[in-house]
Amino acid sequence: MTRKVLDATGIEPDDAPAACRWAALRNQAHGLDIVATVIHRDGCWAQLHNDAYFARSTCADSAYDRGLEEPQ
């Protein structure tokens, strides 16, 4: 799940070998915070336009796929 969010937001796309560095922090029993730099290891800025939208969308799709909630 975390990898899907990282790919969707542009933090660590599947096809980027020099992606941003990141860490996932568990803040509650059912919550996870992702902290990431905005610069790739090669010095280029990450393309993070609408990253919050893509993160929410990916999480909602994953929850729906697991039968946890209905689509909105």
Image (cartoon, helix red, strand yellow):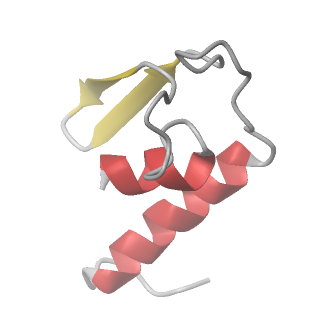
Residue 66 sits in quarter: bottom left
Q: Position of residue 13 (x, y in %)?
A: 50, 47
Compared with 14, 31 (above or below) is above
Total numbered circles: 0
- What residue do we see at 53% from left, 86% from top? 71
Left or right: 37 in relation to 15: right
Q: Position of residue 26 (x, y in %)?
A: 25, 27
Q: Quadrant of the N terminus?
A: bottom left
- Which one is nearer the viewer's eye here, 68 or 61? 61
- What residue do we see at 64% from left, 57% from top? 54
Q: Quadrant of the C terminus?
A: bottom right
- What residue do we see at 36% from left, 72% from top? 63
- What residue do we see at 27% from left, 85% from top? 67
Q: Residue furthest right?
A: 49
Compared with 8, 19 (above or below) is above
Left or right: 17 in relation to 53: left
- Which one is nearer the viewer's eye here, 67 or 18? 18
Compared with 53, 11 (above or below) is above
- Which one is nearer the viewer's eye here, 6 or 64? 6
Q: Position of residue 46 (x, y in %)?
A: 69, 30
